[in-house]
Image (spheres, grey):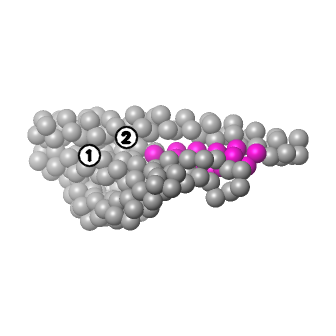
Amino acid sequence: MHVVAFLVRALSGVNRLVGNVFSWLALAIVVVCFTVVVQRYVFSTTQVWMQDLYVWLNGAMFTAVAGFALLRDDHVRVDIFYRPAGLKTKAAVDLIGVLIFIVPYCYVIFAYGLPYVQRSWRLYEASPNVGGMPGFFVLKSFILIFGLLILIQGLAMIGRSVLILRDRMDLVPEHLRYGHGKE
């Protein structure tokens, strides 16, 4: 069980690190968007690549921090029954939910996203906008990164559920315990 606890901490740590790094893109998005607005309405000019940039930063940020949101339990949940449920019931629901929904969803992302991203890399796809940014293939790669980070957090949730269902709550890191997910 100590190995499972280590894996839960390590996998969750990946999403915590990625989430903390990529959440800073929100500041970059605001700065770039503000610059585009000032250029357009004060100087009556615009740079298409800058318009692409804040949209791309937004896409990269939201796909990269999705696993972090799952880690922090910040995702949308209809929790009429979940919230008042006991610890083991929550662990069982999470375990079943990950196995039935998250793992197959990640499979679909990889199965359909990989050829799409590979094609984009082969073509070194650029922005569809004339005068836009090069490197659209990098942004499309975030589709696979999204799937990977969600899968990683799903595996951490499986590990946490196993620890709880095996009465090893003492091995579940404090910040991953139910009711303590908000950091």
Residue hosting label 1: 156
Residue 38: in magenta span: no
User: What main secondary structure does the magenta stretch of the protein show?
Assistant: helix
> Would residue 32 appear left or right of 117 to someone viewing this image?
right
Three-letter amino acid code of the residue under disc 1: Ala
Residue 59: in magenta span: yes
Question: What residue is rendered at 71% in x and 55% in y?
Answer: 130
**Structural crowding at the residue carrying mark 1, measured as other residues with C-alpha within 10 Å and reported as few (<14), some (14–19) or many (≥20):** many
**11 or 172, nearer to the observer:** 11
Could you say where residue 89 lies in the image, as x and y percent from the top left?
A: 23, 57
**69 or 136, nearer to the observer:** 136
Element at badge 1? helix
User: Quadrant location of the C terminus?
Assistant: top left
Q: Which mark is residue 137?
A: none
Q: In the displayed structure, would residue 167 be above or below residue 17?
A: below
**Structural crowding at the residue carrying mark 2, measured as other residues with C-alpha within 10 Å and reported as few (<14), some (14–19) or many (≥20):** many
Q: Which picture quadrant has residue 26?
A: top right
Question: What residue is rendered at 16% in x and 45% in y?
Answer: 163
Residues at circles 1 and 2 in contact by the CB criterion of under 8 Å: yes
Question: What residue is rendered at 85% in x and 45% in y?
Answer: 45
Q: Which residues are magenta?
A: 47-64
Could you say where residue 39 lies in the image, as x and y percent from the top left?
A: 82, 41
Could you say where residue 80 lies in the image, as x and y percent from the top left?
A: 38, 63
Residue hosting label 2: 15
Could you say where residue 129 lies in the image, as x and y percent from the top left?
A: 68, 57
Question: What residue is rendered at 68% in x and 50% in y?
Answer: 132
Three-letter amino acid code of the residue under disc 2: Asn
Q: In the displayed structure, would residue 171 be above or below residue 67?
A: above
Element at badge 2? helix
Q: Using the rendered image of the protein, determine whether residue 10 is visible from the camera's viewpoint.
A: yes
User: Quadrant location of the N terminus?
Assistant: top left
